[in-house]
Amino acid sequence: MTEKPSSIIMVWSASAKNETPICFSKNSPPFNYNHTVASTYYSAVFTGLGLSSNLFAFVVLVKAFHRSQSPSHTSFLIFLSSLVVTDFMGLLVTGSIVLSFRTTHFDWHDLDPQCHFCNFMGVSMVFYGLCPLLLGAAMAMERFAGIHRPFALSANMSKSRALSTVLAVWVFAGCVGLLPLTGLGSYHLQQPGSWCFFNISSQPLDMTFCLVFCLVGLLSLAASFLLNTVSVVTLLRICCGQGDMQRQRNLELEMMGQLVLIMIIASICWCPLLVSIAQTVLSGKHLQIVDLLLWIRFATCNQILDPWVYILFRCSIFKCIFPVGKERPRGSMRSLYPTSMASRRRRAQDSAVEAVRGEGAPCLADQPTPQTC
């Protein structure tokens, strides 16, 4: 009777040792995959291009932030800077893991027997994937309020409030990414063994997390589309006037143009992945790994294209390419028609003199005019 509990404990410990960790339960290494040099170069170029683009955009944004005098533009630059930083860190974290696997071909069983490293990459994939979509929705709300209630926004929207909004977005995305660690879903090693992502299946817990992930992303895109559409229509109604506020309207148009482009890029890059995941879990079908890799690469392109929106689509860039309006280069029109401009000036002076004489001004001795004297 005394040996029975000890034997049970030994059997339990042996079964625990032989139990496969949950991250390897679906796809267990090693995989039959040909690690070509081209795939390594592709990952390196992809990651390097994204990191350099976001770093360059961050430098440009910092310079613009120091020159900004508008509170709404300052808040918008804070959101853009947070988006660039998030994209940079996402590429740095996930890209370094993928490149390490491509170059060293490490064994996940030996490196990560308890799935901590795989869970970290899974959380990173979800966090850095949802953050750009949520930040795009937050920027759309900020611009919507700035156009429709400018005085209330200028009184309430400070730098600290913009930073608080960014921090809230990061916390929310982090909480969503941590849900599989609490039991709602699970992170698994994905083929070809270079990355981890949540399990896409019709099991109740996995399906629930997949739908949460898809709904958060799609609702963010839908909110951005709705708010940006209303803001653009409203802005176009008031942007055609002239006067002292023309510079401010140009700034509003620049911010809205950048925001619309960010929304379009995010929609093109993320909608295929989000829709395919939702269709897969709701239909009970199995998502092909080739399709999943293709949509993941599409989503990663969002982190590379985002910084170029601000780098290229700025008023200063357009003014250098298309110099029009009041800031036309000197000598462009006046040098072409010097006689015409001088004659117009003389006619304006003559009409002013005649207007003064018509009001009963005294006649000059050297310019007698019978009609007025």
Image (cartoon, rainbow, N blue to C red):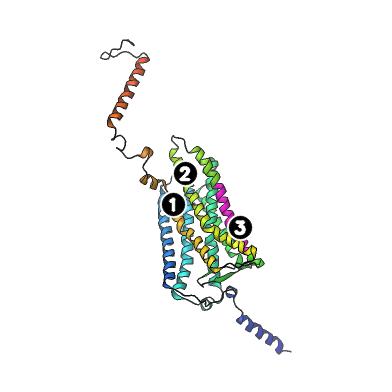
Residue at the (58%, 56%) spot, across then down? 218
Q: SS at mark 1?
A: helix
Q: Which residues are magenta?
A: 208-227
Q: Is residue 225 magenta?
A: yes
Q: Residues within 10 Å of mark 3 (few under 14, many from 20)?
A: some
Q: Say which residue label 1 marks.
A: 310
Q: Is residue 204 left or right of residue 328?
A: right
User: Given the image, on which type of amino acid does mark 1 rest?
Assistant: Tyr
User: Going from the N terminus, do you reach mark 1 or mark 2 first?
Assistant: 2
User: Going from the N terminus, do you reach mark 3 or mark 2 first?
Assistant: 3
Predominant secondary structure, magenta span: helix
Q: Say which residue label 3 marks.
A: 215
From the viewer's perspective, is residue 137 above or below residue 21? above
User: Given the image, on which type of amino acid does mark 2 rest?
Assistant: Leu
Where's the N terminus, which quadrant? bottom right
Residue at the (43%, 58%) spot, across then down? 54
Q: Is residue 161 magenta?
A: no
Q: Residues within 10 Å of mark 1 (few under 14, many from 20)?
A: many
The image shows residue 367 at horizontal and vertical percentages of 27, 14
Q: Are marks 3 and 2 in contact (CB under 8 Å)?
A: no
From the viewer's perspective, is residue 154 above or below residue 110? above
Q: SS at mark 2?
A: helix
The image shows residue 330 at horizontal and vertical percentages of 31, 38
Q: Say which residue label 2 marks.
A: 253
C-alpha separation, residue under disc 1 versus residue under disc 2: 13 Å
